């Protein structure tokens, strides 16, 4: 009977050791997998941030271009008014 009890205790100890090893392996696998996942998420986040910054810069450049175009149109309109005034003066003569 003592022999059966010692075999059962030994089997129980082996099972406990096996559980510990499996748990440690699972932690290692989880850590490795999560490291890869986190790296991918960081990479995607950085790409999104770069894209957003790029879009903001493009929008800002477009606003600046539009302002330059509006300034050029205003200059042309002012120039036309000056020419029209000269025509009015010569027509009166």
Image: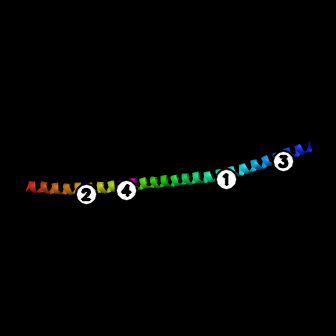
State the mark number for residue 28. 1
Contact between marks 3 and 4 (CB within 8 A): the answer is no
Nearer the N terminus, badge 3 or badge 4? 3
Q: Position of residue 88 (x, y in %)?
A: 13, 54
Q: Secondary structure at mark 2?
A: helix
| Mark 3 or 2: the one toward you | 3
Q: CA distance from mark 3 to mark 2?
A: 97 Å
Assess whether residue 60 is covered by the magenta stretch. Answer: yes
- Disc nearer the start of the sequence (2/1): 1
- Disc 3/disc 4 C-alpha distance (Å): 76 Å
Residue wearing tag 3: 10
Give how far apart the Cα atoms at labels 1 and 3 are: 27 Å
Q: CA distance from mark 4 to mark 2?
A: 21 Å
Residue at disc 3, secondary structure: helix
Label placed on residue 61: 4
Residue at x-position 79% and y-position 48%: 14
Magenta highlight range: 58-62
Cα distance, mark 2 to mark 1? Answer: 70 Å
Which residue sits furthest right? 2
Q: CA distance from mark 4 to mark 1?
A: 49 Å
Residue 53 location (% of width, % of height): 45, 55
């Amino acid at each position: 009977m003592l022999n059966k009890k010692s075999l059962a205790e030994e089997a129980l100890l082996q099972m406990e050791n096996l559980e510990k090893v499996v748990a440690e392996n699972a932690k290692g696998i989880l850590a490795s997998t999560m490291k890869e996942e986190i790296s991918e998420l960081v990479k995607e986040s950085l790409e999104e941030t770069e894209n957003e910054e790029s879009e903001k810069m493009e929008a800002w450049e477009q606003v600046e271009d539009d302002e330059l175009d509006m300034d050029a149109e205003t200059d042309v309109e002012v120039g036309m008014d000056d020419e029209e005034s000269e025509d009015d003066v010569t027509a009166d003569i």
